Amino acid sequence: MNDDLVIDVRGLTKRFGGRTVVDAVDLAVARGRICGFLGPNGSGKTTTLRMICGLLIPDAGEGTVLGEDLRTRRSSIKARVGYMTQKFGLFSDLTIAENLEFFARVHGLDRRRERVAEALEQLGLTSRGDQLAGKLSGGWKQRLALAACVLHGPEILLLDEPTAGVDPQARREFWEQIHGLAAGGMTVLVSTHYMDEAERCHEIAYIAYGRMLARGSIAEVVAASGLKALQGEGPGADRLAAAIEARPGVAMAAPFGTALHVCGPDMAALHEAVAPWAGTIAFREASPSLEDVFIHLMRGAEDNSVVVHA
């Protein structure tokens, strides 16, 4: 086993009512890394997170989290992990400081006042400590939820779509905090639907229908997709998506503002596909985006979430 890996699981599988929601997932994440966990709704991301932190027992698979056996040391794992769910349970009628004091008691922490003060300072909440949680904006609620999750000093932080419904500035500030925590040695596994957030991660993992479809750095995932791309600009370029996507050799075509983005596995075939419009639209070779790759993977994914009959 690689001693630097704090998450090292293989073949994780989970079924509910005969339906396979996570299917033989392998995942390895090193200390201090931020891994983006991506995939469509219902892809198994949340279920995988819950197995990693010890809340769910896998039906199959093995591995370690923080060197602890995933199956036999679940209580120990839970004590060393912070988990922020999509709807984190804050008490609206308590102040920020009172919420943190409550979570400090839940974790049985000593030096509670000192720890709460440190958390407030670390996440920029000191001046708002006496403010009621229910009066906070979405961004500040997320910041408070993060403070509650790291109060006990976890070594791994699991974040389940933490910035859903939060404005762009608050999202950026949230991610600055995440990078600060990772720089201090905390390992972060974060599920997200936002491509710009995926690009803020050190590495990414893409799961669909319970299966891992891509894994690695963004550059590695894009390169492994085998996609090539053309960017078209000119009068009405954005209106040609449907016509060009129907051409041989084109996997997808999508408007980006007034421009057109065309992708496929072979560059020569792409040039041939857009040739009828080359007189009025200027096409140049471009790099496929992460969004291109994920749409391509999703279209090729097989829905294996079938009911298994005994």
Image (cartoon, rainbow, N blue to C red):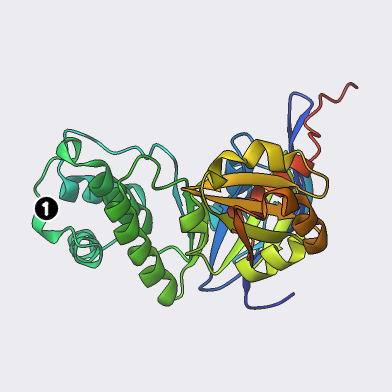
Q: Residue 65 sits in which quadrant?
A: bottom right
Q: Residue furthest top?
A: 309
| Residue at (70, 53) in percent of width and height | 263
Q: Quadrant of the C terminus?
A: top right
Q: Position of residue 270 (x, y in %)?
A: 76, 56
**Residue nearest the observer in this picture, 98 or 14:** 14
| Residue at (46, 75) in percent of width and height | 185
Is residue 40 visible in the rendered image? The answer is yes
Q: Residue 283 sits in which quadrant?
A: bottom right
**Residue nearest the observer in this picture, 160 or 209:** 209
Q: Callout 1, which amino acid?
A: Arg
Identify whether 40 is placed above or below 309: below
**Residue nearest the observer in this picture, 174 or 127:** 174
Identify whether 4 is placed above or below 142: below
| Residue at (72, 67) in percent of width and height | 223
**Residue nearest the observer in this picture, 1 or 109:** 1
Q: Position of residue 200 (x, y in %)?
A: 47, 64
Identify whether 36 is placed above or below 32: above
279 lies left or right of 191: right
Reading the image, the residue beneath label 1 is 128
How many marks the image carries: the answer is: 1
Q: Residue furthest right?
A: 310
| Residue at (81, 24) in percent of width and height | 307
Q: Position of residue 161 (x, y in %)?
A: 46, 45
Is residue 53 visible in the rendered image? The answer is no
Q: Residue furthest front?
A: 279
Secondary structure at numbered mark 1: helix
152 lies left or right of 39: left
Q: Residues within 10 Å of mark 1 (few under 14, many from 20)?
A: some
Q: Quadrant of the N terminus?
A: bottom right
